[in-house]
Image: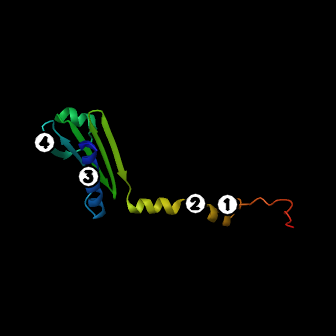
């Protein structure tokens, strides 16, 4: 795994862990210069290519933490990545709002499951 991917994964995991501990929401750009220098600044209103062009970076990551969800976008040359995780509350809401087939059938909103019954049962001798 190259440095771009390893750094993206590490930054994402750090942001996700911070989100789980209740850290404040953020929208942050992390720009890596060709010499390896690292610069962090607010990313609000910036697109990744604009951040690279304006600040002379080689690689850029944008980390957004909002209401327990985490999103990381990255760009380095022709490589891009997008990682995301939703908050535990959002996951629970999504799972609990999804209709379950057997509950829908019991409530009468879906036809019950029917198994085919052969017209003649084989007789064993």
In the visual, does 61 lie left or right of 34? right
Secondary structure beneath dot 3 equals helix
Q: Which residue is mark 2?
A: 99
Q: Separation of disc 4 and disc 1 at Cα?
A: 60 Å
Nearer-N-terminus badge (3/2): 3
Mark 2 surroundings: few (<14), some (14-19) or many (≥20) residues within 10 A? few
Q: Quadrant of residue 107?
A: bottom right
Q: Residue at x 14, y 41 (%)?
A: 36
Q: Position of residue 35 (x, y in %)?
A: 12, 37
Instruction: Single out the mark in the foreground, 4 or 1.
Output: 4
In the visual, does 16 lie left or right of 114? left
Secondary structure beneath dot 2 equals loop
Q: Separation of disc 3 and disc 1 at Cα?
A: 46 Å
Question: Is the image coloured rainbow, by chain, by secondary structure, or in one colour?
Answer: rainbow
Q: Which residue is mark 1?
A: 109
* Front-most of residues 80 and 56: 80
Q: Separation of disc 4 and disc 2 at Cα?
A: 50 Å
* Front-most of residues 6 and 80: 6
Q: Separation of disc 3 and disc 2 at Cα?
A: 36 Å
Q: Which residue is mark 4?
A: 37
Nearer-N-terminus badge (1/2): 2
Q: Which residue is mark 3?
A: 10
Answer yes or no: do the residues labelled 4 and 1 have beta carbons within 8 Å?
A: no
Nearer-N-terminus badge (4/2): 4
Q: Position of residue 15 (x, y in %)?
A: 27, 55
Q: Separation of disc 1 and disc 2 at Cα?
A: 10 Å
Nearer-N-terminus badge (4/1): 4
* Front-most of residues 47 and 77: 77
Q: Residue at x 85, y 59 (%)?
A: 119
In the visual, does 118 lie left or right of 24? right
Q: Residue at x 29, y 50 (%)?
A: 9
Answer yes or no: do the residues labelled 1 and 2 have beta carbons within 8 Å?
A: yes
């Amino acid at each position: 795994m190259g440095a771009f991917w390893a750094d993206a994964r590490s930054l994402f995991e750090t942001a996700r862990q911070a989100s789980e501990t209740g850290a404040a929401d953020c929208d942050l750009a992390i720009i890596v210069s060709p010499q390896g220098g690292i610069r962090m600044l607010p990313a609000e209103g910036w697109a990744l290519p604009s951040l690279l062009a304006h600040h002379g970076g080689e690689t850029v990551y944008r980390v957004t933490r909002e209401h327990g969800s985490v999103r990381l976008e990255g760009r380095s040359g022709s490589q891009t990545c997008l990682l995301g995780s939703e908050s535990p509350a959002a996951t629970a809401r999504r799972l609990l709002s999804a209709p379950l087939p057997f509950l829908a059938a019991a409530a009468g909103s879906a036809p019950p499951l029917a198994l085919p019954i052969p017209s003649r049962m084989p007789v064993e001798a």
